[in-house]
């Protein structure tokens, strides 16, 4: 029997968005699904999130935002990751994602882009696929 | 060809639970003996009579309808001003102000941490000219204003701006009417608001209240808020208990400053109209009864007004779904109805498109129209407390009172509401219940239409699609860059001597333990920004200027503080 390496994931919120139920819900859901989860808490900077991701050696960053600013946030996090030479860390997103932003995010390489109330099983499946390299 | 057989299920969509949203287990019906312990005169009274279970006015809505309100705060002060004018024409009677998320956290738009949420959720309210633009042509007297922000710095600062505008226009501030949430428990418990640590927030909170009671008696400077703790996981008895505990603490603290509960007058709470219809109604009734009893029996109120609780409402944003947003119209309507049946005094209804983006004009006019329909077509407000005497509602009201009292005792045993916040106990209670609800949803013991049940099959229809498409535009990178330029330009254009003088006075008042409200008003008048006022208060306590630890101290602030320290 082979033991699989646990997926490590950083849940992150950037800026002053206060909506926290999404990441809190995912924190337990990811844990229950056997992943190792770290949550940054609110009021983080993009550089701080990228640094934490590198320091913690995570496979995935899951960004949460409910202000509609996800493309702006994702872009700066991706840039910070690149600056740290950690462009291989996957970035997925969820929260209030406007339809007109979807394409932009996908183009940047941000996957998932889940709206509120997405079944947890769908998000977990996506996360596993992302870590296994089945989704890019 | 074989035809697909239609499956028929008579019990499709059947009930999945027998308890209220807050886990109060219910019988299938209630009987007179369930309410036998109730005495009409002692526990209910007519509307307008102690303990005000049935409402605080004898003729209830016949004399005055509830105030119709919602937060109006778009990206720019000009847009917000325009929106206010449109809504007032549609029947808005209570002007609820908010700011963008960085402002609410205590920082200016030119702070690096502001960028990612700038102008999101409201106006970047960094200084007086913003308020002057936002409130252009709107009356300042004879109008109810409400401040719905998060950080404690915001309440004293935005109140100061309102006072400053009145004084600059030669109006008597005694006529300032309305309220601010100004709830230091909510600021930390729900938001972990970075502006001030709780021990400093508590001082600013009380300074602001003391000043307002003495100088603007029609302004309620603290409205204990149950809405956001409830949205974050607290059940109804804990939502209510938290408000009662904070209100009690506030009155006791004011007594130390020489203000009695009779002088403070009526209390106002901001409560949540949740999905559970009858529980929400019973909660409002229990809230009035409990405050009346606490005010009279525990806090020694002798004036009837001081025993009255006014209830301001925000209908649940959490109950609204991103899926099938049209359904939110039904949710909001039911929540509005529960408020009217529960005898509330002001009502901020969420919009059907709120889970999709910031509310659009049409969705908000729907909220106002729903209230007009309830009033004029359904005739609901003709009779006060129409559910009074219902075996179920009376039983549930008493049940909530008992549960809330138990919670209050627990808070007291643990040293009071601030100690329960600082020890993390409140957070644990809230988080445990949030997890419980999360599991119930996963296990389908709590059904949310369109989310974990009755889902949309196939492509979304045109009506739902349209609601999604009108969702409000988010400020672009260019908008944000322009805002930063505007703020920098404003900061450079101020009178340096006045800045220094007022910064020094605010710092000194903070350090010497004097009431800081007047210095904040004067600082606001000469253009000190919210971020600078927050920083000066922090420096006055010997902690860092920037709550985010990312920026340095502005030159004039450094001078104000240094000169003082040398003196």
Image (cartoon, rainbow, N blue to C red):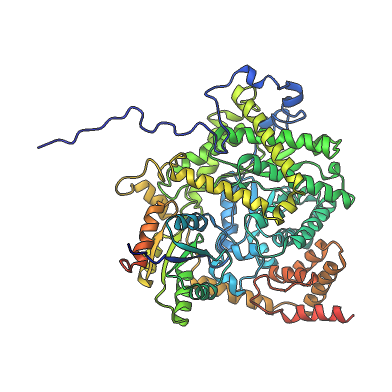
Identified at 64% across, 53% down, the residue is B427
Q: How many marks?
A: 0
User: What is the quadrant of residue B406 in the picture?
Assistant: top right
Residue B304 visible to the viewer = yes
Identified at 31% across, 45% down, the residue is B457
Q: Nearer the viewer, residue B65 or B189?
A: B189
Q: Is residue A55 above or below residue B319?
A: below
Q: In the displayed structure, does residue B116 sit left or right of residue B138?
A: left
Q: Which residue is at the far left?
A: B1
Q: Where the N terminus of chain B falls, by quadrant?
A: top left
User: What is the quadrant of residue B512 in the picture?
Assistant: bottom right
Q: Which residue is at the far front?
A: A1
Give how far across and how far down residue A33 sits, in percent.
Answer: 42, 56
Give how far across and how far down residue A34 sits, in percent.
Answer: 43, 58
Q: In the displayed structure, does residue B152 sit left or right of residue B295?
A: left
Q: Is residue B103 above or below residue B224?
A: below
User: What is the quadrant of residue B412 in the picture?
Assistant: top right
Q: Is residue B188 above or below residue B231?
A: below
Identified at 57% across, 32% down, the residue is B278
Q: In the displayed structure, does residue B444 sit left or right of residue B24?
A: left
Q: Nearer the viewer, residue B163 or B18?
A: B18
Give how far across and how far down residue B141 sits, in percent.
Answer: 74, 51
Q: In the displayed structure, does residue B408 sit left or right of residue B467?
A: right
Residue B137 visible to the viewer = no
Q: Where the C terminus of chain B falls, by quadrant?
A: bottom right
């Amino acid at each position: 029997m082979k033991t699989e390496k646990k997926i490590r994931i950083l849940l992150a919120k950037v800026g002053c968005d206060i909506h926290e139920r999404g990441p809190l819900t995912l924190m337990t859901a990811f844990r229950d699904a056997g992943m190792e989860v770290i949550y940054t808490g609110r009021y983080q900077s993009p550089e701080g999130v990228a640094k934490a991701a590198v320091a913690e050696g995570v496979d995935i960053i899951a960004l949460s935002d409910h202000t509609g600013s996800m493309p702006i946030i994702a872009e700066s996090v991706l840039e910070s990751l690149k600056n740290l030479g950690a462009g291989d860390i996957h970035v997925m997103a969820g929260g209030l994602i406007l339809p007109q932003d979807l394409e932009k995010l996908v183009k940047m390489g941000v996957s998932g882009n889940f709206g509120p109330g997405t079944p947890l099983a769908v998000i977990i499946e996506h996360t596993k696929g992302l870590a296994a390299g089945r989704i890019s | 060809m074989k035809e697909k057989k239609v499956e028929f299920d008579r019990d499709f969509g059947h009930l999945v639970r027998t308890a209220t949203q807050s886990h109060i287990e219910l019988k299938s019906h209630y009987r007179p003996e369930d309410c036998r312990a109730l005495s009409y005169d002692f526990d209910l009274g007519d509307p307008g009579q102690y303990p005000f279970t049935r409402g605080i006015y004898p003729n209830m809505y016949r004399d005055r309808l509830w105030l119709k309100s919602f937060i109006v705060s778009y990206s720019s002060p000009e847009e917000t001003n325009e929106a206010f004018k449109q809504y007032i024409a549609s029947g808005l009677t209570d002007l609820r102000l908010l700011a963008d998320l960085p402002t609410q956290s205590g920082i200016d738009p030119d702070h690096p941490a502001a960028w990612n949420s700038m102008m999101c959720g409201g106006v970047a309210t960094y200084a007086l000219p913003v308020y002057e633009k936002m409130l252009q042509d709107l009356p300042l007297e004879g109008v109810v204003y409400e401040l719905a922000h998060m950080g404690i710095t915001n309440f004293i600062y935005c109140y100061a701006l309102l006072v400053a505008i009145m004084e600059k226009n030669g109006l008597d501030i005694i006529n300032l009417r309305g309220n601010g949430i100004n709830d230091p428990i909510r600021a930390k418990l729900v938001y972990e608001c970075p502006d001030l640590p709780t021990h400093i927030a508590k001082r600013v909170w009380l300074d602001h209240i003391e000043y307002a009671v003495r100088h603007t008696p029609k302004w309620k400077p603290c409205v204990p808020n149950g809405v956001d703790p409830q949205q974050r996981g607290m059940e109804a008895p804990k939502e209510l208990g938290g408000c009662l505990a904070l209100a009690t603490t506030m009155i006791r603290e004011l007594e130390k400053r020489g203000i009695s509960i009779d002088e403070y007058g009526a209390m106002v709470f901001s409560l949540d109209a949740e999905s559970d219809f009858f529980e929400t109604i019973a909660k409002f009734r229990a809230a009035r009864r409990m405050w009346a009893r606490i005010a009279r029996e525990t806090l020694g109120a002798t004036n009837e007004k001081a025993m009255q609780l006014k209830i301001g409402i925000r209908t649940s944003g959490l109950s609204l779904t991103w899926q099938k947003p049209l359904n939110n119209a039904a949710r909001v309507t039911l929540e509005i109805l529960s408020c009217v049946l529960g005898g509330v005094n002001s009502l901020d209804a969420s919009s059907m498109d709120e889970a999709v983006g910031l509310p659009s004009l049409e969705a908000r006019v729907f909220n106002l129209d729903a209230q007009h329909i309830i009033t004029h077509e359904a005739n609901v407000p003709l009779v006060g407390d129409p559910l009074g005497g219902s075996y179920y509602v009376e039983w549930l009201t008493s049940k909530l009172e008992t549960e809330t009292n138990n919670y209050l005792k627990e808070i007291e045993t643990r040293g009071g509401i601030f100690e329960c916040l600082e020890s993390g106990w409140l957070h644990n209670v809230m988080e445990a219940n949030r997890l419980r609800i999360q599991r119930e949803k996963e296990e389908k013991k709590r059904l949310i239409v369109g989310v974990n049940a009755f889902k949309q099959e196939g492509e979304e229809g045109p009506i739902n699609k349209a609601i999604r498409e009108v969702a409000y535009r988010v400020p672009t990178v260019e908008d944000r860059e322009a805002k930063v330029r505007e703020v920098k330009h404003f900061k450079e254009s101020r009178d340096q001597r006045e800045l220094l003088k007022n910064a020094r006075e605010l710092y000194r008042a903070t350090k010497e333990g004097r009431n800081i409200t007047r210095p904040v008003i004067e600082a606001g008048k000469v253009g000190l920004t919210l971020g600078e006022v927050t920083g000066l208060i922090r420096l006055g306590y010997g902690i860092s200027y920037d709550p985010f630890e990312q920026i340095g101290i502005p030159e004039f602030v450094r001078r104000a503080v240094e000169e003082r320290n040398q003196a």
